[in-house]
Image (cartoon, coloured by chain):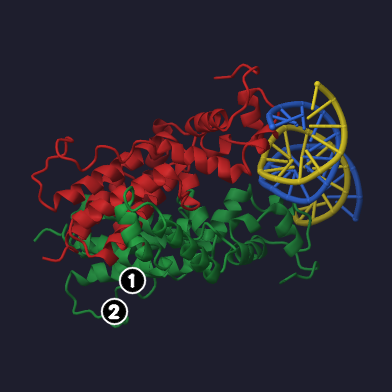
Chain colours: A red, B green, C yellow, D blue
Amino acid sequence: MSRSSPTERLTRARIVAAVTDLLERGGVDAVSTRTIGEALDVHPTALYRHFRDMDELLREAADGILAGLADGIGETGDGETSDGGPGDALDAVAGLCRRLRAVLMSHPGAAQVMASGPARMPNERALTEKMLGLLAEAGLPDAEVTLAYHAVIEYVVGSAAIDTAGTADSPAEVEARHRVWRAAYFAASPQEFPHTTRLAALLYPSLDEQFEFGIEVLIAGLRHQIPT
Amino acid sequence: MSRSSPTERLTRARIVAAVTDLLERGGVDAVSTRTIGEALDVHPTALYRHFRDMDELLREAADGILAGLADGIGETGDGETSDGGPGDALDAVAGLCRRLRAVLMSHPGAAQVMASGPARMPNERALTEKMLGLLAEAGLPDAEVTLAYHAVIEYVVGSAAIDTAGTADSPAEVEARHRVWRAAYFAASPQEFPHTTRLAALLYPSLDEQFEFGIEVLIAGLRHQIPT
DNA sequence: ACCTGAACACCGTTCAAGT
DNA sequence: ACCTGAACACCGTTCAAGT
């Protein structure tokens, strides 16, 4: 537990750091005025001198997670294979989505916060700018650039929110639960559920496989929206 | 307010009906043991005689919303143009997704409940069976049938959870908020945010337009996964 | 058997009081 | 100016008591 010494003065930055820590370790349910106070050796209501309410605080913490995310994506020599063609911009979109998912999955709770509405704060705005630029570079008409932006963000944030919902569960526990569910589907009536029983073993693949397939299909669909 | 007479005995069905009503009118935050008790003229703790906890109750209510959803989709003469080709099965998938979104949007809170994990209850299982059947009929290999199922469900449920997050706000209020956000993006620095400022007027299209574009792109992407 | 009442351990937030 | 303490209006849940 990173309990701070009570001598230091309380600042927005120290509160946000404590919340980020709680968000990372126990999800959004681990964050409360009481747990923050305990982490900082301060009265539960002390944060109200620095933030209007919990929502403002959670959004600032969630935005902090996104720091540096848009940097070094879509530029030549960034690891993604690139010959400068316009289609490569969509590969960069996919790469950016994978990075976004990674930070959301490593901070359970952040996705829940982002799913409750856009924060429209510095790091999120940088991400928006980057994503819009890449989609335009890919050759999509303007109206479809913004639609594609929303589709992609809703998929990444929405699926991360779902995938981190059973927070505080280890990957092993998640997989164990999926195994039980597969067995239940397998045991269903083959007359009533022919496809479910036949495909039971293939249901609930790992969360990362699910995401990878989804983002690839989405990007492939966008590729076919590019006018020739 | 549909306050019931206190003479009738309490049943699972009456409790679920009350919760469905609360879910529809005020989202998941409107549901509590106290509000349920008030709606049914009963003590807040009375429901514990019929349900293990709030989670079990919310899941049963959320599953009830899905009743009849899978009926009459993908059969000939259902309104969708159909010539019996395998590609039409994906049109039926899209239709099923639109229906699912419609019920989730008309019951704010239901999407939040579904986003917290699969209920694996009767109506959801019927939906799963239908969706798997259509994806297999479309010609996808088995492994991709289940991946496509998860991708599509995560997109529909995830985006509905995001879109119903600012619950208790009328569509007019949502649109007014979007207008303010567009104006703020438009007013940003064109040097730092060239794409954001240029595309500001096109950001935050209506939630239904966003969904329609997303589901079309996703289905288009799946169409290209079908082996020839 | 079913529902009530009281109690417990939590929430977020406000506001007067202390320093 | 900044933090504390007490208080308020909420949560979900348990369990003994009433009928």
Q: Are marks 2 and 1 in contact (CB under 8 Å)?
A: yes
- State which chain disc 2 sits on: B
- State how many labels appear: 2
Residue A179: image quadrant is top left
Residue D3 % position (x, y): 71, 27
Q: Which mark is residue B95?
A: 1
Residue A143 % position (x, y): 29, 66
Callout 1 secondary element: helix
Query: Front-most of B23 and A84?
Result: A84
Q: Is residue A49 left or right of residue A22?
A: right
Q: Is residue D7 left or right of residue B202?
A: right
Q: Is residue C10 left or right of residue B217?
A: right
Q: Is residue B145 above or below residue B81?
A: above
Query: Front-most of A166 and A76?
Result: A76
Please name the amino acid that badge 1 sits on.
Gly
Residue C7: image quadrant is top right
Q: Earlier in the sequence, mark 2 or mark 1?
A: 2
Query: Which residue is denoted by mark 2 in the rendering?
Result: B80
Q: Is residue A206 visible?
A: no
Q: Which mark is residue A137?
A: none
Please name the amino acid that badge 2 sits on.
Glu
Which quarter of the rendering shows the N terminus of chain A? top right
Q: Is residue B196 visible?
A: yes
Q: Residue at x 58, y 45 (%)?
A: A55
Residue A85 % position (x, y): 10, 51
Give the class, few, some or many, for how many residues have Cα within 10 Å of label 2's Cα (few <14, many ≥20).
Answer: some
Callout 2 secondary element: loop
Q: Label 2 to label 1, Cα distance in Å?
A: 8 Å
Q: Is residue A198 above or below residue A40?
A: below
- State which chain disc 1 sits on: B
Please check whether the numbered discs 2 and 1 fall on a single chain.
yes
Which quarter of the rendering shows the C terminus of chain A? bottom left
